[in-house]
Amino acid sequence: MNIGVPKERRPFEFRVGLTPAAVQMLAEEGHLCYVEHNAGIGAGFSDQEYEQAGARVVYSPHEVFGRADLLLKVARPIYEELEWLRPQTTIMGLLHLSSARMDKIKVLQEKHITAIPYEQIAFADGSVPVRKPLSQIGGRLVAQISAHLLQNDAQGKGLLLGGIAGVPPAEVVIIGAGIFGTYATRAFVGIGAHVTVLDVSYEALMRIHDEMPNVVTMMSNQINIKRVTTFADVVVAGILVPDERTPVVITRDMVRAMKPGSLIMDVSIDEGGCVETSRPTSHDHPTYIEEGVIHYCVPNIPSVVARTSTFAFLNAAYPYIQEIAEKGSEQAIADNPAIERGAAIIKGQIRHLPRLRPIGAEGE
């Protein structure tokens, strides 16, 4: 199979669709990988490494898109890339189609594209193997990012997360006790913050409590969320609802009632966001202030540790890439239930696609 690895064109997306090691494994099985010039530079992979692994380095994105039967991206295609897509191509990546504009979905349908978002590949129990390592990385990153954003030089309120003798630590509220929330909790506890975790699952809260008994755990409901946001210095919202856009759980009134200069990190923004006042930001301008509260709503948080996160998500994604390359997407979808659950669009027909953002709404 011809496999294309283009250079990512979204701002501040430094990850790449295949590592040289993955290229070598695919090449040894007889597949031909076309890698665009400097596609891996942000993650620390040179063209020479790809060539030594057996790839053909090409200097035109049109050639990568035109030759690929299987296109391996990281971020959702921008409009220019959609024009380059060859009809009936299979595309895999962290596509987040639930927050895509409908006109982009229409292009995928018109070109009879098969789209398999990594984040939708799922086991029968609902676990998402490719998304898991990225959630782990994101959970660890939010602690160090929030520590900086609370500093005065970042227009924060001048708080040290862990406090010091005679000065209490910052109050951190984490909404969502899944993989992301668990890793975020560990990171904040390690820094010394006082952490409160909310979730709708009692079992998830029990896991947090058993591992970290000093963490306060509460059931997630409107009364409790309203209560904890009033005293929080940092609110980290990381909610995932399978096959749906995330619901809004923090209203504008709740934000308005927060302490001035507090920080909200809406990590669910790539699935639509769960804070009423959230809108997507970027790594060069990661924050804005609304209702007197700092908002951090960067969709692709792990991209700034591109080497780590590229290795991490491809460690999990490679078996599915390999199976599709070997069998073709149609047979792989038929044979593997995890891939079938992840197939959002098959030959232009919508199969498993969460509710979509209407045309004209914010986002791409």
Image: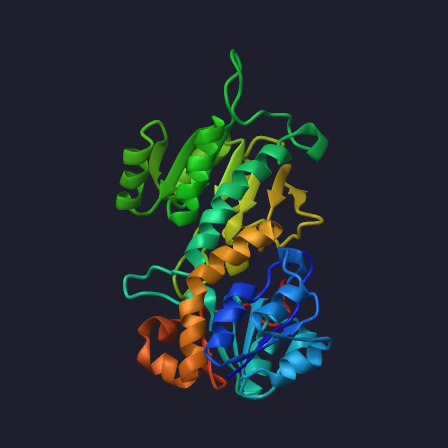
Compared to residue 227, the image places residue 347 above or below, namely: below
- At which x and y percent is residue 18? 55, 66
Q: Residue 337 is drawn in which quadrant?
A: bottom left
- At which x and y percent is residue 345? 47, 79
Residue projecting furthest to the front: 52
Give the side of residue 345 with respect to residue 220, left or right: right
Q: Residue at x 32, y 65 (%)?
A: 123
> Can residue 329 be seen here?
yes
Q: Residue at x 68, y 82 (%)?
A: 63
Q: Nearer the viewer, residue 21 or 248?
A: 21
Q: Residue at x 54, y 48 (%)?
A: 266
Compared to residue 136, the image places residue 171 above or below, namely: above
- At which x and y percent is residue 220? 36, 43
Q: Residue at x 49, y 42 (%)?
A: 140
Q: Nearer the viewer, residue 278 or 323?
A: 323
- At which x and y percent is residue 318? 44, 67
> Can residue 352 be seen here?
no
Is the C terminus in the top left, top right, bottom left or bottom right quadrant?
bottom right
Q: Nearer the viewer, residue 176 or 339?
A: 339
Q: Residue 181 is drawn in which quadrant?
A: top left
Give the side of residue 303 with respect to residue 1, left or right: right
Q: How is the image coloured?
A: rainbow
